[in-house]
């Protein structure tokens, strides 16, 4: 059975190529319309979507790493999916670097040089004190470092995974275990610092010690939702018959648990700032309460109440249709969550939710799907010669 299912690769046909291409074309039209109407809005929408999809790809690299480090066997049957998703990292990181280089003046207030000139009436003492960290050369250096670390490790995981298929040498698995442990150390630091850089520095006078954890929870649960939906798609197409309801139960538990964890951090960050009631801290939530209230309150219901009720029971986590619904809700919910991190500090009160926002999201989703399916077509869907493959095939809970 293992040999039979391991030989299959995803077949790219005209139909599953054309849909992502059409989606990308919609995204291009939306971006062009954005720049024709409001340049700041266009850059903000690009940043919002690029970060969100890059975060899901990074979550897939994290998923691979902690399963190797923990030497978990259950996830071996689906690991080619997160491996393929990490292929988007190269597109996402190039996009983030280019967005900053060409759009930083519209997105990041701290990049304006007059704020650091003591002779200028716009001199900002607070930002001047942060200039050792928030300066353009160092910022770009950090973005490049994130790209090298994340893409480098994901390519190393992929390389040894494919070599394992070829020669079956146990050394590749052992190297991936070591790589996973090392990557987790880098991820622990860079997942937080990148959130500070890309998102928190938009509101450059504000900071939160919980922001890194909060962003991590969101990126991981949305990444797990995407892994789950690709698993269900491939299973529905007959590529993953070895995946049973026990595997689905496990990915469902991740989606359920981290939706609760995200809510804990969402509430903790808000409650502590609300209780302290310090002007330099409450300004972040004050803006969102005044001008984004419906979306901000809805964020709680979409990202906590809905996944909690849908995925609460054991049976729900084992039903494909329920996991599809839960995955779609989490995907859209955390897209809104990132929207609320980006837009108040960039476009302020002039926010919109229209074709430019949704069209750009569709475009990035099309690129994300195309990249993942393209990677899936390059190797067997199920790993061959993995030492824990039999454990995954006989997984039961």
Image (cartoon, grey):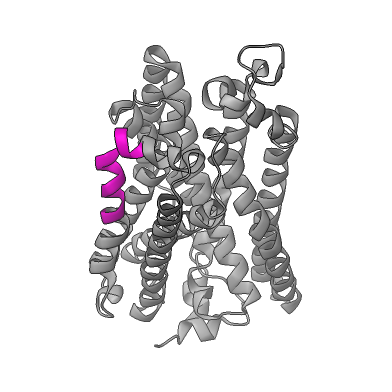
Of residue 24 and residue 253, the one placed in the foreground of this image is: 253
Of residue 37 and residue 159, the one placed in the foreground of this image is: 37
Q: Is residue 360 visible?
A: yes
Main secondary structure of the magenta stretch: helix
The answer to whether residue 88 is above or below residue 135 is below
State the residue at coordinates (31%, 44%): 296
Of residue 140 and residue 161, the one placed in the foreground of this image is: 140
Q: Is residue 10 visible?
A: no
Of residue 73 and residue 219, the one placed in the foreground of this image is: 219
Count numbered badges in the picture: 0
Tell whether 100 sits left or right of 373: right
The answer to whether residue 233 is above or below residue 116 is below
Q: Which percent across, then down, holds residue 19?
A: 34, 39
State the residue at coordinates (36%, 77%): 249
State the residue at coordinates (36%, 59%): 229
The answer to whether residue 358 is above or below residue 324 is above
Q: Which percent across, then down, holds residue 271?
A: 40, 56
Taking the magenta stretch, the answer to whether it contains residue 7 is no
For the C terminus, the image quarter is bottom left
Q: Which percent across, then down, holds residue 258?
A: 42, 66
Tell whether 166 sits left or right of 16: right
Q: Which percent across, then down, holds residue 12?
A: 44, 49
Magenta highlight range: 288-301
Taking the magenta stretch, the answer to whether it contains residue 299 is yes
């Amino acid at each position: 059975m293992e040999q039979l299912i391991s030989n299959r690769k995803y077949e790219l046909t005209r139909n599953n190529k054309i849909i992502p291409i059409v989606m990308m074309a919609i995204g291009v039209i939306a971006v062009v319309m954005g720049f024709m109407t409001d340049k700041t809005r266009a850059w903000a929408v690009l940043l919002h979507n690029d970060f969100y999809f890059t975060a899901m790809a990074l979550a897939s690299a994290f998923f691979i790493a902690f399963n190797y480090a923990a030497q978990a066997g259950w996830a071996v049957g689906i690991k080619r999916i997160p491996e393929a998703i990490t292929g988007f990292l190269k597109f996402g990181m190039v996009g983030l670097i280019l967005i900053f280089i060409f759009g930083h003046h519209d997105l990041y207030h701290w990049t304006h040089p007059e704020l650091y000139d003591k002779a200028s009436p716009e001199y900002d003492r607070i930002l001047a004190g942060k200039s050792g960290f928030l300066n353009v050369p160092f910022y770009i250096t950090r973005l490049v470092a994130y790209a090298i670390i994340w893409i480098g490790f994901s390519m190393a995981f992929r390389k040894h995974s494919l070599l394992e298929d070829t020669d079956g040498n146990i050394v590749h698995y052992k190297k991936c275990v070591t790589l996973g442990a090392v990557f987790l150390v880098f991820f622990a630091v860079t997942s937080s610092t990148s959130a500070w850089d890309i998102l928190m520095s938009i509101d450059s006078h504000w900071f939160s010690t919980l922001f890194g954890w909060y962003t991590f929870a969101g990126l991981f649960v949305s990444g797990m939702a995407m892994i789950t939906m690709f698993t269900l798609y491939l299973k529905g197409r007959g590529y993953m018959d070895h995946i049973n309801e026990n595997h689905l139960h496990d990915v469902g538990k991740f989606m359920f648990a981290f939706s609760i964890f995200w809510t804990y951090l969402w509430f903790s960050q808000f409650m502590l700032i609300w209780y302290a009631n310090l002007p330099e801290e409450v300004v972040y939530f004050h803006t969102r309460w005044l001008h984004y209230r419906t979306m901000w309150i809805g964020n709680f219901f979409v990202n906590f109440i809905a996944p909690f009720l849908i995925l609460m029971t054991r049976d729900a986590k084992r039903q494909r249709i329920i996991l599809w619904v839960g995955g779609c809700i989490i995907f859209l919910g955390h897209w809104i969550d990132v929207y609320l991190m980006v837009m108040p500090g960039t476009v302020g009160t002039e926010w919109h939710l229209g074709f430019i926002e949704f069209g750009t999201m569709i475009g990035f989703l099309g690129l994300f799907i195309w990249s993942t399916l393209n990677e899936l077509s390059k190797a067997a869907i199920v790993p061959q010669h993995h030492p824990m493959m039999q454990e995954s095939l006989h997984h039961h809970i």
